[in-house]
Amino acid sequence: IIDYLDHEMVGSECVNCDYYCTEGLEFTLLNDSNTYAVSKGTATDSNIVIPQYYNRKLVTSIGLSAFYGCSNLETISIPTTIDYIFPHAFDNTKWYDSNPDGVIYIGKHLYEYKGEMPENTTIVVKEGTTVICEDAFFGCGGVAESPDLQNKLIKLAKGGFKHHTTVGVGHMKYVLEEAFKTYLGYEVIDIEG
């Protein structure tokens, strides 16, 4: 077993095992200086494989419009380290266009609602979903509903239910933390017990 940090990459392949990622991806070190965001860069593959690590640091997000307009992009493999997908990351791609109207998922991420949502639509978020991406329901006029949704999600991105969509009240650690820290300027202290 090779730890991901021990991969010895030559180009896009590890010389010690069968691990690989798409060549030409662009990585941006995020503000915390400990993680990276990924975007298209010079990659032209129709099958994108995003690595868990880059330069021995976690890849945790996919950038704003990262692969937007990559007309030949058919499949996407994202690692479990991805906890944030910015809006429009995969819009206008062959992969996106091949999805029917309705809720689109990438792994355990509810990416967005594609198409026009009919009035009074109820969305049941599928079991195992851990993240609702930013602007996933932007401008939708329905209700996202799932039994115990607040305890299933790990992260609800900023604007996940922006504009006329509602979600039940519950313990949403990251949403509350973002609201209090980012928008209200409060210090958040996590008290166990």
Image (cartoon, rainbow, N blue to C red):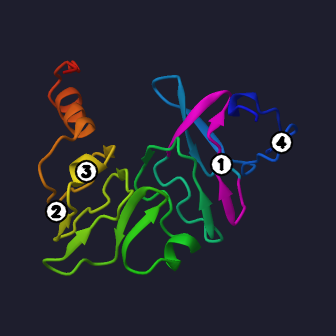
Secondary structure found at label 4 = loop
Mark 1 surroundings: few (<14), some (14-19) or many (≥20) residues within 10 A: few
**Residue type for callout 2:** Thr
Looking at marks 2 and 1 on the same chain, the residue that comes earlier in the sequence is marked by: 1
Q: Which mark is residue 41?
A: 1
**Residue type for callout 1:** Gly
Residue 74 painted magenta: no
Q: Nearer the viewer, mark 1 or mark 4?
A: 4
Disc 1 to disc 4, how far (Cα)?
25 Å
Mark 4 surroundings: few (<14), some (14-19) or many (≥20) residues within 10 A: few
Q: Nearer the viewer, mark 4 or mark 2?
A: 4
**Residue 183 location, quadrant:** top left
Q: Nearer the viewer, mark 1 or mark 3?
A: 3
Point out residue 87 in the picture as x, y percentages from the top left corner.
Answer: 40, 55
Secondary structure found at label 1 = loop
Residue 58 painted magenta: yes
Point out residue 59 in the picture as x, y percentages from the top left corner.
Answer: 57, 38
Question: Closer to the camera, 23 or 153?
Answer: 153
Q: What residue would you read off at disc 2?
A: 165
Picture residue at 43% right of the left edge, 81% below the top: 100
Q: What residue would you read off at disc 4?
A: 17
Disc 2 to disc 1, how far (Cα)?
34 Å
Point out residue 188 in the picture as x, y percentages from the top left corner.
Answer: 21, 21
Looking at marks 1 and 3 on the same chain, the residue that comes earlier in the sequence is marked by: 1
Disc 1 to disc 3, how far (Cα)?
26 Å
Q: What residue would you read off at disc 3?
A: 159
Picture residue at 21% right of the left edge, 64% below the top: 144
| 4 and 2 marks in contact (CB < 8 Å) | no
